[in-house]
Structures are given as C-alpha cells and as structure tokens.
Amino acid sequence: MKINQLLSLIPYGAVVTTSWLASHEVTRDQARKMAKSAWLARVGHGAYCKAGDPLSWESGVYALQAEDKSSLPPVWPGGQTALALHGFAHYLSMGLETTHLFGAKEGRLPRWLSDADWAGQTTLHGEGGLPAQLPGSFCDHKAPHGAFNIRVSTPERAVLEWIAVTKNETLFGSKMVDTFNGLNTLRPRRLQALLEGCRSVRTKRAFLVLARHAGHAWYRRLDTSRIGLGKGKRQITPGGKLDKEFLITIPQEFMDEH
C-alpha cells in the first residue's frame, strides 16, 4: 500500500495498532520505517499515529475498537465518563479525573494506552453484570479533536455501570443522588431492556431505589414485575433502614419520602 493511501485511512487524531496496520498489508518493519521517515509516530509498543497529530484517551479507544472486527466494542467508555460525554458533567463535580473504560472480557489495557501521558488516568472495569450484547447499550460519540467516532455507553447503560462499580458506602451519596435528579431524559424502553438483561441484583435494586427517589416520569413507565430482583434482603447502607419494596438497606432520608 502506498504511504498516502495508508495515511488517508488513519483518521486525524487517531491511534492504530500493528494488527490494524497488518490488516492493511503494512508489516511491522514497514511501520518502523515509516516512523523513521516521520510519516508515522510510534506511541508505544504496537501502536502508531500520524506524525504531529494531537492525541487523547479517545485516540486509544479508537485503536482498540478499530482492530476488533466484531459488531460489539471490546472496550468502551462507560459509567461516569459516558455520562459526562452525554452532557451530564455538571452533576459530576468530582471523579472525572479518571477515564472509566469497560470491557466484555477480563484483562488489562495495553501499556501504550495505560502508561500514555496523553491518555491521562484510565481504569478498566469488567462489564459489571451487563452483557455487551444487550439492546440499547451503545451509541456513537465524536471525538472532540479527532475526525472519528467511538462507541460509548448510552446514558441508560452508563448509569447502571456507574452503580455497578460504586462502593456500598457511597452508593446513595449526594453525587449519585444529584446526578439522578438530572437524568430526566432517560428512555424507559431502553432502561427496561437493560434492567431485564442485567445479571446484578444489587445494581438493579439500587437503581430502582435511586430512580424512585428522583421521581422522573420514566420511572413510572418501568415494569418492575419483569425485572428479576432475586430473593432475600441485601445489606447496602450500613445502619440503614430496610426498603420493603426492593429489600435493601437505604439511608433514613430515602425512607422519609414514603
């Protein structure tokens, strides 16, 4: 492949891996020569970008998603990070210093991404009981200073992911509650499908308590009888009161609203 042809295939601001280059008939040796000639820039072991392009964590996520040919992303921004991308950052005053990525498979991010200064602090979570194939899980997001899209969690999936990775002691804290108060545009059909497919009883029960507390119209359109909530009581809030509807311990102020 001619150099100009290859460079036209790499979006501005994106990273590509050696496996992606190989799929376009560019060997590792050829990639090294292109970097030596300043057509490409090596960003770490097994990864390159066009020389001079600005990079961000989105650049690395693009590389991981582009090298995987399956219909589902292997790694995606989710949880608090995805909520911020969807415009809810003003409710998330803290905790945005870290980019939260999720993956369907257990593992680690490649070092060229996890150790990169341009990517900032990143952490990789498992799918948290939310299979990647659930309908309504992902949508496209345009990178802020790159000519490419990446797949990210929808707001509905993202809030469930955030609950899944939040420790019990902060689950009903002010940041979570304030965020829920601002989530008035969630889609109930998408939520219904995600909740029915979610395997984490803790996540589902906590979500429903927080959603009931926020009192948005979409909560009243959920059919909780179709959502498997397991059996028995769950201790979530130390010293909390038992919520008789969803059988988890919650803070007293949540009880006072009934």
Image: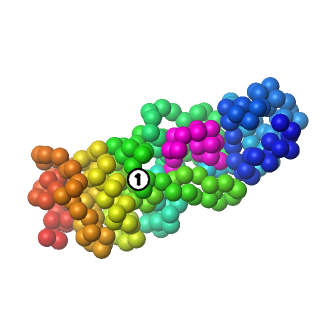
In depth, the one of 206 and 219 nearer the eye is 219
- In percent of width and height, residue 170 lies at 31, 53
Q: Quadrant of residue 51?
A: top right
Residue 112 sits inside the magenta stretch: no
Structure colour scheme = rainbow
Residue that numbered label 1 is attached to:
135
User: SS for tag 1?
Assistant: loop
- In percent of width and height, residue 31 lies at 79, 32
The quadrant of the picture occupied by the N terminus is top right
**Residue displayed at 63% across by 42% down:** 66
Q: What is the magenta range?
A: 59-77
Horizontal relation, residue 60 to residue 179: left or right: right
- For label 1, count other residues whose C-alpha is less than 10 Å away and answer few (under 14), some (14-19) or many (20+): few
Horizontal relation, residue 190 to residue 21: left or right: left
Q: Is residue 158 above or below residue 50?
A: below
**Residue displayed at 37% across by 60% down:** 190
Horizontal relation, residue 188 to residue 117: left or right: left
**Residue displayed at 50% across by 66% down:** 87
**Residue displayed at 24% across by 66% down:** 212
Q: Is residue 10 above or below residue 37?
A: below
Q: Visible in this render: residue 231? A: yes
Amino acid beneath label 1 = Pro
Q: Visible in this render: residue 182? A: no
Q: Residue furthest bottom?
A: 217
Q: Quadrant of residue 91?
A: bottom left
